[in-house]
Image: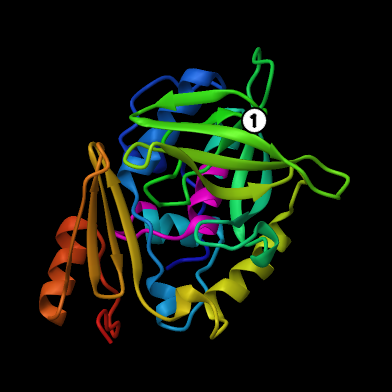
Amino acid sequence: MSGTEQYDLDAYLDRIGWRGERRADLATLRGVHVAHVLSLPFENLDPVRGTAPSLAPGDLMAKMVRGRRGGYCYEHNTLLRLALEALGFRVTSLAGRVVVGAPAPESRPRTHAMLQVEVAGEPHPYLADVGFGAPGALLLPVPLVAGGESEGAGRRHRLVRLPHHGPLELLELQVYDRRGGDWAGQYVFTREPFAANDFEVFNWFVGTHPRSPFTRRPYLQRTTAGRHLCLDGARLTETLADGTVTGRTLTDETEARRVVAEEFGIDVPAGTTLLG
């Protein structure tokens, strides 16, 4: 990767297949957001190899735009932020605690990155997040205000205000589980702004600490029209839009590398072992 390469909006939009208008309006925000999610995979192969990925614009361009790689939340949302700012949006970086599988929100550190985007003419800012990767992730940005529900691209979300003892409003992003018929929390956050150097610290911890789940095994996700794929270690799971889930365990390194290349669109870095 080249740290000297500059950010290139044209190359980014070409990579995600966006051919629409380049305006700082809601239609462009929505279009770029969903195009990014459907084009760029989620993956942690750098941390698995013992390296925290670079968040420098040139390195993100080389890895995710010009190369056949993906990234995790810091990379994805940094790349989206660069694009939105180049298009004229005002963007603020936020950080949250992932609550999927957590006994309580405070049991997890604030390690997830997302974006608050101001849109001219809109009464509220929007929550944008192309780096969560999971079946409950946003495909389209949603108004950043508690109470309302948003449905788009086959997924239904809402923001709920949670009781807490801090000075700032605590919000939880929830997704509607069509199979279970109930709402499920994804992450909680406040609208406190975070700077780039904050995410450098988060990124180093998540990408290198031996207790981080991202350093222990491959965790890859790919969202396409109508389905979501996840490779968690050796377990490959497919989730369809109607909530149907099927899975199998990969037992052969050659097969695993083929699946990662063909199904996830990722070139596995040299020296990486997928199945340990």
- Looking at the image, which is closer to me, 175 or 18? 175
Identify the secondary structure beneath mark 1.
loop
The image's colour scheme reads rainbow
Task: Specify whether residue 5 is in view.
Answer: no
- Residue 165 location, x and y as percent? 86, 50
Furthest residue to the right? 167
Quadrant in which residue 124 is drawn: top right
Write the residue at 16% across / 65% down: 259
Residue type of the residue flagged with mark 1: Leu
Write the residue at 67% across / 46% down: 93
Q: Is residue 9 left or right of residue 153?
A: right
Judging by the rendered image, the residue that carries numbered circle 1 is 144
Mark 1: few, some, or many residues within 10 Å (few <14, many ≥20)?
many
Residue 140 against residue 122 in the figure, above or below: below
> Which residues are the magenta region?
65-81
- Looking at the image, which is closer to me, 14 or 33? 33
